[in-house]
Image: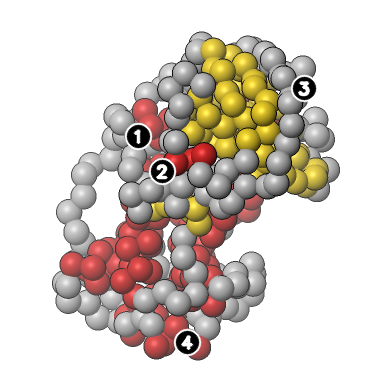
Amino acid sequence: EGADRGRYWSGSMETLVGASGKTWKLKVGQAMRSSAPVDGLYASEVRVVKDTETKTPYVLKRVSDSGGQLMEALINEAATWRKIGIGAAGWPRNVVELVDVFVDREQRSVGYLMEYCSGGHIQRRGVNQAIIVSTVISVCEGLRAAYDAGVAVHGNVCYSSVFSNASGDVKVCGFGAARRVYLDDAMDEGGSAADVRAIGALVYEMIDGRPPARSGAVHLPPEAATVLAPELLETLNRALSSKARSRPSFDELFDLFCAIRDGRKTSAGSAAEPAPRAAARTASSSVLQAVRSTGPSASREADKTGSGPGPNRGASL
């Protein structure tokens, strides 16, 4: 019921058949975000929806292959996303859960039904070191779950793809068309090296309120020196380097933030003593076969009876 407070519902209902085989009856909220075709390739719309049977709120992100080039890639994104949950033998705490997928080949669209993160976007401006450290560790935990599942690089970590739920858990999302567009560039950068720079950029935006330049020489804003310990400042500035080989490794970055959190000794420019971590898990080789195949077209029963003002924050993209 929490999703209803301050939320305007459009009055429409949709019946959709998911790749899981389940038939969903969803009450549809107002659009939280929509975009015209990006680079002529895809358009997207994000809405809060509610399962009429359980009253559970979710977020439905529908991506349309407007350019006729991304349909299979969008389906593969669903499989990649789902693989993270399978590889972790239970959905990782710091990755937004993909609940089901709706494939409509006639309309060239893929719908991702995901958990609703009522906390909205993470805080930016006015943050202290404790908030930054906690956020980065959560993002790294989400990325580690993806890497353990065989995902070489996320490639789309940014402020708009990191959310928090009602319990304050920070979660990584950002799967879908945008990730596919950036993926080749991320792989060219050396896989996780692209994610390392993205973490540096995320911290930059948390402090400054605006994202840094996407390329070229970038350093944290001057006020970072009043917020972060010298070893964090030095390592994050290296993470923002335009040259992948000059950045710290993902493990070095992750271990340093864990050391700061745990009070372990560190020295600028060198990795802290690594914290023990679980061995990587082997992901199942069979992931969302129903989605990869022809897949059911999303059946729709709409009964639009009205509309209201746009909703408040709390999207999970």
Q: How dense is the environment of label 1, judged by Cα within 10 Å: few (below 14), some, or many (20 and up)?
A: some
Rounded to the nearest angstrom, the CA distance separating label 4 from label 2 is: 30 Å
Colour scheme in use: secondary structure
Q: Is residue 84 above or below residue 106?
A: below
Task: Name the residue that disc number 4 marks.
Answer: 223
Marks 2/1: CA–CA distance: 7 Å
Q: Earlier in the sequence, mark 4 or mark 2?
A: 2
Amino acid type shown at disc 2 = Val
The residue carrying pointer 2 sits among few (fewer than 14), some (14 to 19) or many (20 or more) residues within 10 Å by Cα, namely many
Amino acid of disc 3: Gln
Q: Is residue 274 above or below residue 162?
A: below
Provide residue 121's location: percent of width, then percent of height: 50, 56
Residue identified by numbered label 1 = 91
Label 4 residue SS = helix
Give the residue pinned by disc 2.
95
Mark 1 or 3, nearer chain start: 1
Residue 81 seen in the current view: no
Towards the viewer: 8 or 152: 8
Q: Residue 42 appears at what percent x and percent y?
A: 75, 39
Q: Which residue is mark 3?
A: 107
Q: Quadrant of the N terminus?
A: top left
The answer to whether mark 2 and mark 1 are in CB contact below 8 A is yes
Report the residue at 74% width, 31% height from top: 306
Q: Are marks 4 and 3 in contact (CB under 8 Å)?
A: no
> Label 3 crowding class (10 Å Cα cut-off): few <14, some 14-19, many 20+?
few
Q: Earlier in the sequence, mark 4 or mark 3?
A: 3
